[in-house]
Image (cartoon, rainbow, N blue to C red):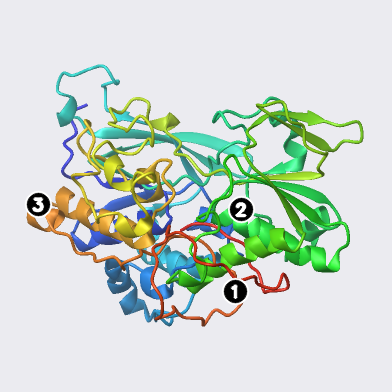
């Protein structure tokens, strides 16, 4: 292969928030992007949690280069102080941005492999002079075709949404988990959808997880329980309950996030959910009546449940990058230079220092994992952080090292963690009172009525 790389596009994997922002910054730099999106439209993953209302406001969810690209179309930025749902984000910003990029975005394009042209993972000779080659499949009805494209660089912004964590505490699916797939979901159910609501109403549901998504599932199931007798949740935590279990409460600078933890606590306090602590799921068994029995590593067996909602985090899909030389942290599966900055054992979302191309680099020059995927298994990603990442990467690819190394983002003191707000008022704004970080210890918590408005949760 003698093709030079200078005239080739930079291929961006994923037409989500970070991928489209990367394309906008590349365009601003005069570099042709080619965005490969597996879904039928932009922000396919975001649309799957379209019922979610984010903690972040519109002011924190749009990228400056993208705004410049959209301006000539007559696009008007939504009110910066309001909180969109995932569907709002996709329809009012992400899809219009993809439309502006036009033919530079290809849909139904699922990347199956990335390598150097004519060089597998072990070959050193002339490796860095060879363009990248990406294999991807396209679908047209029942017809699936395999295609390839060459690139000067690759920006993987495919996220982590498609690879949720399992119920099994070992990181592997529990024994019997796959066989029980008909009664297990790995997403927060949209209980405002009548069909989905019918699946959980009057039923006993296990919720496995300890983050914002688990809070939301508990709160919304409690809301259903008000009107549907017999609806009950069993909250399964691998650890015990401590002062920080329910988040920052009223001291949280993001009131929507604080209310979410308070509502989850109210679900337990008011008897709509039972908490089971220190339970690490080892086996999922099928009872004679079809319901599920969860068995812990310590031998404990819980009473049968009708449904299981597994919300144990997300992880990156690295399978199609097997021929690329990546440098990843052994725990987080994040770039080795980035991992110490985002380790959830050391950092909350507000203490992650803005970073760019150097922290995102790998032994394979020209490859960058950005957005949620760059964080591997760490949960505290911010949309604003992703936008700063791709600004820096685009500058580096354009040869503007000075700009690439410059930090052009100042995060709020507590950060703006991705997630949903437990509120129905899209015009709600941030509180100007109180302090507390996104992972701050909980203050004295006050109970919220279980009838408080509720939405479902997810990350940005």
Left or right: 161 with respect to 404? right
Report, in whole angstroms, how far the alpha carbon at label 3 lies from the one at label 1.
43 Å
- Choose mark 3 or mark 1, whichever is in front: 1
- Relative to 70, is 360 above or below? above
Does residue 416 sit above or below 292 in this rendering?
below
Q: Residue furthest right?
A: 289
**Sequence-earlier tag: 2 or 1:** 2
The residue indicated by pointer 3 is: 401
Q: Earlier in the sequence, mark 2 or mark 3?
A: 2
Residue matched to label 1: 423
Element carrying mark 1: loop
- What residue lies at 46% left-to-right and 36% top-to-bottom? 317
In the depicted structure, whether residue 74 falls above or below residue 200: below
The kind of secondary structure element at disc 2 is helix
Q: Quadrant of residue 76?
A: bottom left
Residue 214's disc number? 2
Question: Which residue is pictured at 23% across the width and 64% down the height?
Answer: 409
């Amino acid at each position: 292969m003698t093709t030079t790389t200078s005239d080739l596009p930079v291929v961006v994997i994923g037409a989500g928030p970070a991928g489209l922002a990367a394309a906008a910054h590349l365009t601003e730099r005069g570099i042709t992007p080619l965005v490969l999106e597996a879904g039928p439209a932009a922000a396919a993953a975001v649309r799957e949690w379209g019922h979610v209302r984010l903690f972040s406001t519109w002011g924190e969810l749009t990228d400056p280069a993208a705004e410049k690209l959209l301006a000539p179309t007559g696009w008007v930025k939504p009110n910066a102080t309001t909180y969109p749902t995932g569907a709002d984000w996709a329809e009012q910003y992400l899809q219009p941005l993809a439309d502006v990029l036009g033919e530079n975005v290809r849909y139904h394009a699922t990347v199956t492999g990335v390598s150097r042209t004519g060089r597998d993972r072990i070959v050193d000779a002339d490796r860095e002079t060879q363009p990248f080659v990406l294999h991807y499949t396209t679908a047209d009805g029942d017809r699936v075709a395999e295609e390839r494209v060459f690139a000067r660089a690759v920006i993987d912004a495919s996220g982590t949404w498609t690879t949720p964590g399992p119920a099994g505490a070992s990181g592997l699916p529990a024994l019997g988990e796959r066989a029980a797939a008909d009664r297990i979901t790995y997403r927060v159910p949209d209980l405002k959808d009548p069909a989905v609501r019918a699946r959980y109403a009057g039923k006993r549901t296990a919720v496995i997880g300890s983050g914002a998504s688990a809070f939301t599932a508990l709160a919304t199931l409690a809301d259903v329980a008000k009107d549907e007798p017999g609806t009950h949740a069993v909250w399964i935590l691998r650890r015990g309950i401590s002062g920080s279990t329910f988040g920052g409460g009223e001291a949280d600078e993001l009131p929507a996030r604080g209310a979410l933890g308070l509502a989850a606590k109210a679900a337990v306090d008011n008897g709509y959910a039972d908490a089971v602590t220190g339970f690490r799921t080892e086996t999922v068994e099928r009872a004679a009546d079809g319901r599920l029995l969860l068995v812990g590593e310590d031998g404990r067996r819980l009473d049968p449940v009708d449904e299981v909602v597994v919300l144990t985090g997300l992880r990156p899909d690295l399978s199609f990058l097997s021929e690329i030389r990546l440098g990843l942290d052994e725990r987080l599966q994040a770039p080795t230079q980035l991992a110490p900055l985002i380790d959830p054992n050391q950092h909350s979302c507000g203490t992650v220092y803005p970073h760019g191309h150097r922290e995102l680099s790998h032994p394979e020059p020209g490859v960058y994992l950005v957005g949620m995927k760059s964080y591997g298994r760490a949960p505290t990603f911010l949309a604003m952080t992703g936008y700063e990442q791709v600004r820096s990467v685009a500058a580096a690819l354009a040869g503007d090292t000075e700009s690439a190394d410059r930090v052009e983002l100042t995060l709020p003191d507590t950060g703006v963690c991705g997630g949903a707000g437990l509120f129905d008022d899209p015009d709600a704004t941030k509180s100007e009172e109180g302090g507390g970080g996104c992972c701050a210890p909980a203050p004295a918590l006050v109970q919220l009525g279980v009838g408080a408005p509720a939405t479902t949760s997810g990350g940005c």
